[in-house]
């Protein structure tokens, strides 16, 4: 088992591998080079016979720790939901279009139409398009009506709340929030990833609880929605 931090397992930064004679540069994203290019670390391990399957996976623990594996030996034999990767999103690990909902009585639609998504464990937070972000803030506000949390400004993140006493742990307030649902595909190929509150809220040093999903339009992601490491916590992500 390899212990790893989120950034060491990055797979979303555009980098290029070596150039062989007569061949173009190949993409090898991230610190470990585990992007989708032919020159990535996993492909090289397979070419050298170290692993038999072009597979890697990771699990980031919600309370710290985690593991990273290469090859198919550690892939669970059951309980895995597989989603095909889209081929039109460059070198990113993308399951294609997805819809985001928040459970407020009936399903509360956050994304009004399917949105292009990508997974990037190298990003601490998750980023969504500004329209989705605005609806998400409104939906979360509905879930917090009548709770002991009140809206407050904090230098750490954009959307934060506080109680009468400083909040120490996410576990102390997660019951006040509702889970999100990220649904990929449609029909028989539909798969839903439930995002519990502890995977999208964080507690700051000042004792506030803040939304760990940010406005991706402010950092130039346009309509690309990035699912970061915080949202993947306690899931075994297999690529």
Image: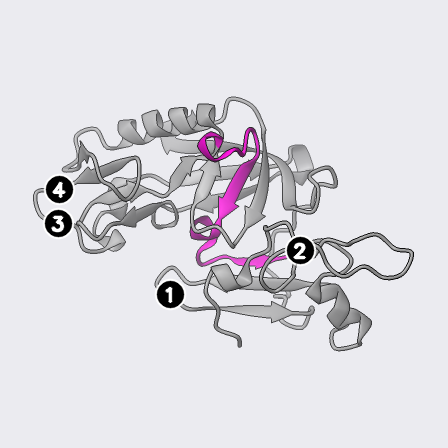
In the orientation shown, which residue stands out farthest toward the left?
164
Residue 234 falls inside the magenta stretch: yes
Residue 122 falls inside the magenta stretch: no
Residue at 59% across, 43% down = 118
* Residue 96 x, y percent position in the rendering: 65, 37
Residue on which the image places disc 4:
163
Residue on which the image places disc 2:
35
Q: Quadrant of residue 237?
A: bottom right
Disc 4 on helix, strand or loop? loop
As drawn, the label of residue 76 is: none
Give the Cα separation between the discs numbered 4 and 3. Answer: 6 Å
Residue on which the image places disc 1:
64
Neighbours of disc 4 within 10 Å: few (<14), some (14-19), many (20+) = some
Give the Cα separation between the discs numbered 2 and 4. Answer: 42 Å
Give the Cα separation between the discs numbered 3 and 2. Answer: 41 Å
**Label 4 with label 3: CB-CB less than 8 Å:** yes
* Residue 143 x, y percent position in the rendering: 28, 31
The magenta segment: 217-239
* Residue 31 x, y percent position in the rendering: 58, 62
Q: Is residue 112 above or below residue 211?
A: above
Residue on which the image places disc 3:
166
Neighbours of disc 1 within 10 Å: few (<14), some (14-19), many (20+) = few
Disc 1 on helix, strand or loop? loop
Q: Mark 4 or mark 2, which is nearer the start of the sequence? A: 2
Q: Nearer the viewer, mark 2 or mark 4?
A: 2
Q: Mark 4 or mark 1, which is nearer the start of the sequence? A: 1
Residue at 39% across, 25% down = 134
**Label 2 with label 4: CB-CB less than 8 Å:** no
């Amino acid at each position: 088992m390899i212990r790893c931090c989120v950034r060491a397992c990055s797979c979303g930064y555009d980098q290029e591998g070596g150039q062989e004679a007569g061949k173009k540069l190949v993409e090898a994203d991230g610190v470990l080079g585990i992007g989708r290019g032919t020159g990535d670390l996993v492909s090289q391990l397979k070419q050298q016979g170290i692993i038999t399957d072009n597979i890697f996976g990771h699990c980031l623990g919600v309370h710290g720790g985690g593991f990273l594996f290469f090859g198919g030996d550690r892939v669970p034999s059951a309980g895995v939901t597989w989603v095909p990767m889209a081929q039109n999103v460059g070198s990113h690990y993308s399951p294609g279009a997805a819809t985001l909902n928040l459970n407020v009585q009936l399903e509360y639609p956050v994304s009004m139409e399917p949105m292009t998504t990508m997974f990037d464990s190298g990003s601490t937070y998750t980023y969504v398009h500004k329209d989705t972000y605005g609806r998400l803030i409104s939906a979360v506000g509905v879930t917090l009506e009548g709770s002991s949390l009140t809206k407050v400004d904090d230098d750490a993140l954009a959307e934060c709340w506080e109680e009468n006493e400083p909040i120490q742990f996410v576990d102390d307030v997660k019951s006040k929030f509702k889970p999100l649902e990220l649904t990929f595909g449609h029909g028989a190929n539909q798969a839903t990833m439930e995002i519990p509150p502890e995977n999208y809220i964080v507690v700051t040093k000042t004792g506030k609880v803040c939304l760990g999903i940010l406005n991706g339009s402010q950092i130039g992601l346009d309509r690309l929605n990035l699912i970061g490491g915080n949202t993947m916590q306690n899931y075994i992500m297999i690529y």
